[in-house]
Image: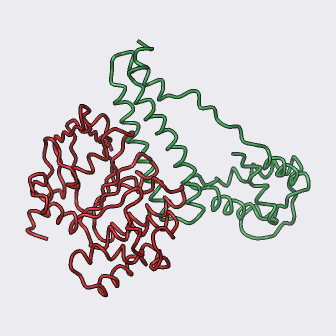
C-alpha cells in the first residue's frame, strides 16, 4: 500500500485499447475501470475480445495503443521484469484449465508463488495449507493435479491465485470445464474468499449464471466495451 | 400452479387445520407470494364440496375455523394423477422482446440498445437471485436455480439475436 491518493482511485483503468493479431482487430477502443474489492464480469461472445482485454489488463500482452493504469501507473510502459514482478505480487490468475504444475503436489502448487517470492518452504506450505482448507480441498494436498477431479483442481487453482494476497484476481472462464454443480461451488468460493481478502476480480465468462456472481458487468462486442447503467 | 392440488398434497402427510396448511404452503412454496387466508378457506370449502377432503374433527378454540381437514381416497387419486401428468412445456412463441427488436430495426432505431438494456436488466435480477441463493437453504437454492436457468436461456437468445441483427435488419426492412 502506498499513499491514500493512490488507493482512492481505481485499481485498474484501461482506456482506448487497440490490439490486432494480424489483420483482425481483437480490441478496437476498449476500456474499463476496476475498483478495489469489486467483482466485474467481462462478458461477450467467443472471439469478441474479452480474453485479450483481460491479458492487456494483467500486463500479459501489450496493447498496440491505449493505456492501462494500475494504481495510477502506466502498466504498458513498465519493463518486462517489472511487469512480471507485479503479476507475481499483486495479481492472481485462474484459467479454464492447465495452470497447475503436473509434477508438483497440490500443496506444492499452492506454495509455489510464495516460494518464488523467497519464502521458506515450511512457512509457504503452512500458508498454502490454510488456503487449501479455505477452498475445502485440504484432502488433496498431497495429490498431484492429475489425481484430482476437475472441481478440486479448480479450487486448488483458486487457492494458488489467492495465496499471495493479490489486489486483483484475473479469472478467465474459471468454470468453463466444470459441470453446473462444481462450477457453482468454485464461483461461490472464489467470490467469497476474494471478498474476504478484499481482492478485486476480473471474471471473463460467456455464461450469465457465472456472471451473476459479479457486482457488475462489462460487455465486449467486436473489440469494443459497453457498460449499461440502468435507471434506478 | 393449482393451489387446491398443492393443499391436497400437503394433507397427504396428515390432517391439518386451515391455518397450519397456510403455514406449510408458505414455508415450502409461498416464496414471494404467501397465500391469503381467504384463498385457503375458499379452496378448502371447494375441496370439501367435491369430496376430496373431509372434516376430520372440530376443536373449540380461538377464531371461527378450527376444523381439521383430512384428504379422502378421491383426493389421493387426484394428487396421484396430477403428479404424473406432465406440465405443458411453454412454447414461448410470443415474445415482447422479439417484437421490440423488430420494431427497432424497422424504424431505424438501435436494436442493439434494446438488447443491451434487456441484458443488463436480466443480469441485475440474476444477481439478486444469486445473492438470495447463497444466503438461503437448499430449497431456496433450487427455486432460485430454476429461475436462473430460465433467465439464462433468455440471455442466450439475446446474444444469438445480437449476433444476427444485421441479417434480421435486411429481412424486416
Residue A23 in the image: state x and y as whole percent: 24, 31
Between residue A31 and residue A28, name the one nearer to us.
Answer: A28
Q: Position of residue A160 (x, y in %)?
A: 34, 70
Q: Which residue is nearer to you in this view: A134 or A20? A: A20
For the point 25% across and 68% down, the residue is A166
Residue drawn at 37 percent across, 62 percent down: A99
Left or right of A217, for residue B74: right
Residue B126 percent across, percent down from the top left: 45, 49
Q: Residue at x 52, y 61 (%)?
A: A182
Residue that lies at the very extreme toward the front in this rendered image: A103
Q: Quadrant of residue B8?
A: bottom right
Q: Give me the chain that's green.
A: B
* Side (left or right) of A8 relative to B108: left
Looking at the rendering, which quadrant does residue A175 occupy? bottom left
Which residue sits furthest bottom?
Answer: A122
Q: Colour of chain A?
A: red
Q: Which of B23/A96 is in front? A: A96
Amino acid at each position: 500500500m502506498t499513499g491514500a491518493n493512490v488507493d482512492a482511485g481505481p485499481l485498474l483503468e484501461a482506456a482506448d485499447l487497440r490490439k490486432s493479431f494480424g489483420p483482425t482487430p481483437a480490441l478496437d477502443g476498449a476500456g474499463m475501470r476496476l475498483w478495489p474489492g469489486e467483482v466485474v464480469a467481462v462478458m461477450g461472445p467467443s472471439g469478441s475480445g474479452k480474453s485479450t482485454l483481460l491479458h492487456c489488463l494483467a500486463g500479459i500482452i501489450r496493447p498496440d495503443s491505449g493505456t492501462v493504469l494500475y494504481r495510477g501507473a502506466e502498466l504498458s510502459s513498465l519493463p518486462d521484469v517489472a511487469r512480471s514482478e507485479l503479476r507475481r505480487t499483486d495479481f492472481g490468475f485462474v484459467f479454464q484449465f492447465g495452470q497447475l504444475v503436473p509434477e508438483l503436489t497440490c500443496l506444492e502448487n499452492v506454495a509455489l508463488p510464495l516460494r518464488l517470492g523467497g519464502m521458506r518452504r515450511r512457512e509457504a506450505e503452512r500458508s498454502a495449507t490454510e488456503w487449501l482448507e479455505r477452498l475445502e480441498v485440504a484432502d488433496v494436498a498431497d495429490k498431484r493435479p492429475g489425481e484430482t477431479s476437475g472441481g478440486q483442481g479448480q479450487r486448488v487453482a483458486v487457492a494458488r491465485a489467492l495465496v499471495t494476497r493479490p489486489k486483483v484476481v484475473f479469472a478467465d472462464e474459471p468454470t468453463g470445464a466444470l459441470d453446473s454443480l462444481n462450477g457453482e461451488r468454485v464461483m461461490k468460493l472464489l467470490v467469497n474468499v476474494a471478498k474476504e481478502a478484499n481482492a478485486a476480480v476480473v471474471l471473463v465468462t460467456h455464461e450469465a449464471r457465472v456472471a451473476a456472481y459479479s457486482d457488475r458487468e462489462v460487455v465486449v462486442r467486436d473489440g469494443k466495451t459497453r457498460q449499461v447503467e440502468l435507471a434506478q | 400452479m393449482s393451489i387446491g392440488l398443492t393443499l391436497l398434497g400437503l394433507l397427504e402427510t396428515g390432517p391439518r387445520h386451515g391455518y397450519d396448511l397456510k403455514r406449510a404452503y408458505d414455508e415450502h412454496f409461498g416464496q414471494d407470494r404467501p397465500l391469503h387466508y381467504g384463498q385457503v378457506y375458499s379452496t378448502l370449502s371447494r375441496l370439501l364440496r367435491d369430496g376430496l377432503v373431509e372434516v376430520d374433527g372440530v376443536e373449540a378454540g380461538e377464531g371461527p375455523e378450527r376444523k381439521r381437514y383430512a384428504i379422502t381416497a378421491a383426493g389421493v387419486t387426484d394428487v396421484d394423477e396430477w403428479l404424473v401428468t406432465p406440465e405443458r412445456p411453454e412454447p414461448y412463441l410470443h415474445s415482447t422482446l422479439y417484437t421490440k427488436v423488430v420494431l427497432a430495426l424497422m424504424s431505424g432505431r438501435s436494436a442493439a440498445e434494446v438488447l443491451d438494456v434487456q441484458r443488463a436488466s436480466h443480469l441485475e435480477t440474476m444477481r439478486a437471485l444469486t445473492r438470495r441463493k447463497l444466503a438461503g437453504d437448499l430449497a431456496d437454492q433450487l427455486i432460485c436455480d430454476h429461475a436462473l436457468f430460465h433467465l439464462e436461456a433468455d440471455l442466450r437468445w439475446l446474444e444469438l439475436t445480437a449476433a444476427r441483427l444485421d441479417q434480421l435488419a435486411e429481412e424486416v426492412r
